[in-house]
Image: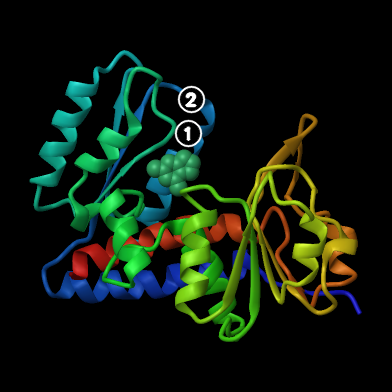
Amino acid sequence: MPAQILDGKQIAAEVREEVKQEVARLKEQGITPGLAVVLVGDDPASQVYVRNKHRACEEVGIYSVVHRLPAETTQAQLLELITQLNNDPQIHGILVQLPLPGHIDEKTVIDTIALEKDVDGFSPANVGNLVIGDKCFYPCTPHGCMVLLDKTGIDPKGKKAVVVGRSNIVGKPMAMMLLARHATVTICHSRTKDLAEECRQADILVAAVGKPEIITGDMIKEGAVVIDVGINRVGEKKLVGDVHFESAAQKAGWITPVPGGVGPMTIAMLLKNTVEAARR
Ligand code: GUN
């Protein structure tokens, strides 16, 4: 039987509605959640992401400021802006859009964001707290994957989860979050000996490698939950995931489409983290 669809668009809309209500409650207490987004340079994809984040904030009533800086901005200038935002009581969350121009050290920049305002959850201190199970912000994309599971009633406890990809932004935090929810977790990557065999063990399979359609139906266990984080452009217009949807959907029990799966969840989680930052 073909898989059921994990509808990220619909679930993200539900989350945004919940966030909107929470923002209204906070405003009654005199708190308006505020997010500052910093964009350096003119990378076209980043410009689109930043515009979408700003718009999503406005829709739920979050105060949003975008700082657009020229590509020649020095690291010292950027750090100075972040310090100002760290000290600005109207700003509860700070997001520096990545990638940054080559002359700026991303690690130094991210580490300058105050821990309590790091709504992306990328700073070493936040990641450390995530690993030890302390209070932290969940990075938006893996957080979105977990909410997709939760809202569909899929409990990772005791299940075998396989995460394909070991990035700091998705793969590693995803594995930690599944582990915290009592899944038995395997992380696969480019040097994994037999990727297909590892994937076939998965009750929950998360693909986050950025390679178009490398996970095919023959690599999927009957009835598995398949979450595809990949968004790969092929040709002029077509977007595909890391999973070959048509063949995988014949085996999986649940599957996310691309687009319309994990993508819409990421911004919804940024809104959620910003409200959480304001609430704290
Ligand atoms: N660039 C691509 N995705 C992201 C993200 O989630 N956060 C930031 N800060 N930059 C990105």
Residue 130 placement: quadrant: bottom left
Q: Residue shown at 39%/27% (left/top)?
A: 100
The residue singled out by tag 1 in the image is 46
Amino acid on which disc 2 is placed? Asp
Secondary structure category for the residue under label 1? helix
Q: Residue shown at 66%/46% (left/top)?
A: 231
Residue 153 placement: quadrant: bottom right
Left or right position of 112 against 120: left
Where residue 31 appears, x then y in whole percent? 14, 66
Secondary structure category for the residue under label 2? loop
Tag shown at residue 21: none
Residue 39 visible: yes
Quadrant location of the N terminus in the rendered image: bottom right
Indicate yes or no: mark 1 CB to ligand 1 under 8 Å: yes
Amino acid on which disc 1 is placed? Ser
Q: Residue shown at 76%/64% (left/top)?
A: 199
Where residue 96 appears, x then y in whole percent? 33, 39
The residue singled out by tag 2 in the image is 43
In whole angstroms, how far apart are the C-alphas of marks 1 and 2?
Answer: 5 Å
Instruction: Count how many numbered circles sit on residues in the image.
Output: 2
Classify 10 Å Cα crowding around label 1: few (below 14), some (14-19), many (20 and above): some
The answer to whether residue 71 is above or below residue 235 is above
Does the residue at mark 1 contact the one at mark 2 (Cβ under 8 Å)? yes
Left or right position of 192 against 59: right
